[in-house]
Image (spheres, rainbow, N blue to C red):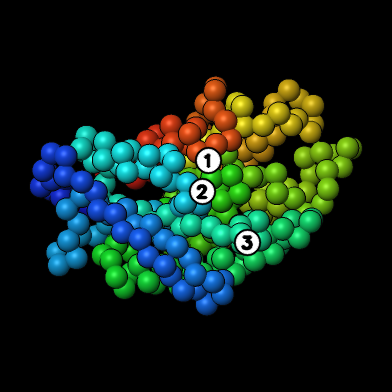
Amino acid sequence: MKFWQNSARAWLNRLKAGEPIVFRNLQFQSTCLQRDVLLDFYLPPGYDESKRQDCRLLLINDGQDLPRMHMKDILQHLYDAQELAPTLIVGIHTSHARIREYGTARQADYKGRGDLAGAYTKFILQELVPYIQRHYQISDLPHHRAFAGFSLGGLSAFDIVWAYPDQFGLAGVFSGSFWWRWSAVRPEDPDADRIMHDIVHHSSNIDLQQRFWFQCGALDEEDDRNGNGIIDSIDDTQDLIKALRAKGYGDKSIRYLELENGRHEPQTWGEAMPDFLTWMMAIDV
């Protein structure tokens, strides 16, 4: 860890004030998904393939929404302030199959949504990460690799990180769709049958070194299926955090950010992005 901190700080010290981040995009042909996937690459300022620069890695679902969050400006500010370790950020654009590809790989929800989540997981692990490893210099340490997402994309990111602690040590979830369930809401037990909560509860192969960041907005929605005065998105997220704590994850492993005026939209997620990046990808972590 000490070597990484010194290396990251040395890299930041070489930066010229205001040196811009490097942006690239790519159309990736996926066999697992049987479609082309558009990828946006946000590389740290001064990135040079000819020099050894073991960047951290952050994958983000719904990458098409990052420009609406002013991602370039956010990254530029954090790099200029030397608050972010050198990180390769890959925004993964979704498609018309979003409701099928995002979800939980174990099973689809009770309406059959998420039936391609297993294929999406294979795309990430068998195609995308190996491609990145071949073409970019990234750290091979799980705690230097993160996956994040928004809404249903957040559920997808958490599911993959949780299932593969040998690949990812960090998950970031913005307004996560943790209501995902295998049966319709039952009035006598409205919080039952939530898939991700059940997965965490029954997991035995866990890594207590993993870290999890969650964000909710008080205005994410209005639904309150159990009538306790707390909207479902907050309830579901806090219940998942309770499940993680029951597994042994402590305060250093979990951060929860609730925005009083936060809505279920990119503007809110952009406001929360600096908090996520500095907590998950900071140099001294």
Label 1 belongs to which residue?
174
The answer to whether residue 89 of the structure is visible from this angle is yes
| Residue at the image position 89 percent from the left and 37 percent from the top | 188
| Residue at the image position 65 percent from the left and 36 percent from the top | 233
Relative to residue 53, is residue 192 drawn left or right?
right
Q: Does residue 79 sit above or below 227 in this rendering?
A: below
Return the mark for residue 97: 3
* Mark earlier in primary sequence (1, 2): 2
Say which of marks 3 and 1 sits in front: 3
Give the structural element (helix, strand or loop) at label 1. Answer: strand
The three-letter code of the residue at mark 1 reads: Phe
Residue extending farthest bottom: 31
Q: Quadrant of the C terminus?
A: top left
The three-letter code of the residue at mark 3 reads: Ala
Relative to residue 88, is residue 264 drawn left or right?
right
| Whole-number angstrom distance, CA of label 3 to CA of label 2 | 16 Å
* Mark earlier in primary sequence (3, 1): 3
Return the mark for residue 149: 2
The answer to whether residue 143 of the structure is visible from this angle is no
